[in-house]
Amino acid sequence: MTEPRRRERLRPAELIGFAAVIALFAGGTIFVVTRDLGFASIVLGATFVIDLIVISMLMLAITPNKPMDGELPPNTPHD
């Protein structure tokens, strides 16, 4: 087997980072509006978990390089 490329190894870290950025934005916005650190941290944590679930479900929904219905896979001899 071949070793996964660097991009493939870092993919989970990118998705977690993306979810963290969204959560920080939501938590920061709530903190600026309400000035309540406890509520902002709850929103930050909840947003992070929800973002991770949504992003992982979206990643499961797509299959890269999968041929469409009725389409021949690449490198298949045509009849």
Image (cartoon, rainbow, N blue to C red):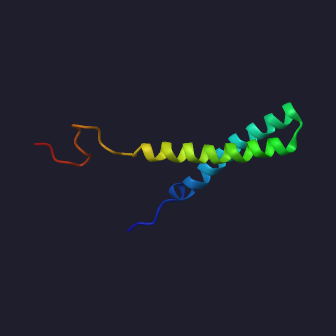
Who is closer to the viewer here, 22 or 79? Answer: 22
Residue 70 against residue 14 in the figure, above or below:
above
| Extreme residue toward the top, this view | 33
Q: Picture quarter containing residue 32?
A: top right
Residue 78 lies left or right of residue 42; in this view the side is left
Residue 27 against residue 3 in the figure, above or below:
above
| Extreme residue toward the left, this view | 79
Residue 54 lies left or right of residue 42; in this view the side is left
Which image quadrant: the N terminus? bottom left
Q: Position of residue 68 (x, y in %)?
A: 29, 38
| Extreme residue toward the bottom, this view | 1
Q: Residue at x 81, y 41 (%)?
A: 40
Q: Residue at x 79, y 46 (%)?
A: 41
Who is closer to the viewer here, 62 or 78? Answer: 62
Which image quadrant: the C terminus? top left
Number of numbered callouts drawn: 0
Q: Residue at x 75, y 38 (%)?
A: 25
Q: Position of residue 29 (x, y in %)?
A: 79, 34
Q: Position of residue 19 (x, y in %)?
A: 64, 45
Residue 76 lies left or right of residue 62; in this view the side is left
Q: Position of residue 34 (x, y in %)?
A: 86, 33
Q: Residue at x 77, y 40 (%)?
A: 27
